[in-house]
Image: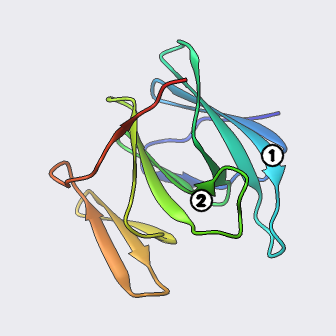
Amino acid sequence: MKFYNPKNKEKIGIWDYQAIIDYQRLRIKLEYKTEPPFGDSIYSVKLVFDGGQMNIFPFWIYGRAILFFNNYVVLQGMEIGSYNNELYSMIIDIDTRQYTILDNWYNKYDIENNLLVLLDTFHNKKQVIERKNKFIWFPIFL
C-alpha cells in the first residue's frame, strides 16, 4: 500500500493496487477494482473525515487525475460497477462533508486567478468553480 500527502493545488495520479491519501482532515482509501480496455486504473473509495467513521463513496473513480484545491477534492469517475457508461466529474467538499456531481465530465484542470477551472477539451467546455456556484450537494454517509 502506498501513502500520499498531496499539497494544496496539486494533482496526483494513483497507479497502485491500494493507496491512502491524507489531505487536510480527510483520509481517502483507494482499492483497485478493474481496468477498462484502454487502460487507467479504477478504484473504490472510502472516506474518513477527522479520524471518524469510514464512509463509502458511491462512485468508482479513476486514479489518473485527483486534484486537491483548498477544501475540495476533484475526481473523475463513474457509477459503481460500470466503466463503459457515462463519466462524471465530482467534487468532495471536505468542510461540509458533501459531494456534487458536475454537469459534464471535465478531463483537464487549471488554476486561474486562484480559482479552479475545469476544462472539457473534447467539447470545448469550461467551468469556473467558485463558492457562489449553485451545485446540488449530497451528504457523505454510510
Between the C-alphas of marks 1 and 2, the distance is: 15 Å
Q: Quadrant of residue 95?
A: top left
- Location of the C terminus (image quadrant): top right
Mark 2, secondary structure of its residue: loop
Q: Residue furthest top?
A: 52
- The residue wearing badge 1 is 32
Residue at 73%, 52% (x, y): give it.
Answer: 81
**Which percent across, then down, holds residue 120?**
44, 78
Q: Nearer the viewer, residue 4 or 17?
A: 17
Residue at 26%, 52% (x, y): give it.
Answer: 135
**Which amino acid lies under the numbered mark 2 shown in the image of this protein?**
Ala
- Image height of 141 relative to 9, above or below: above
- Image height of 71 relative to 112, above or below: above
Q: Which mark is residue 102?
A: none
- The residue wearing badge 2 is 65
Q: Earlier in the sequence, mark 1 or mark 2?
A: 1
Task: Using a 10 Å C-alpha cutoff, classify the residue at mark 2 as few (fewer than 14 neighbours), some (14 to 19) or many (20 or more).
Answer: some
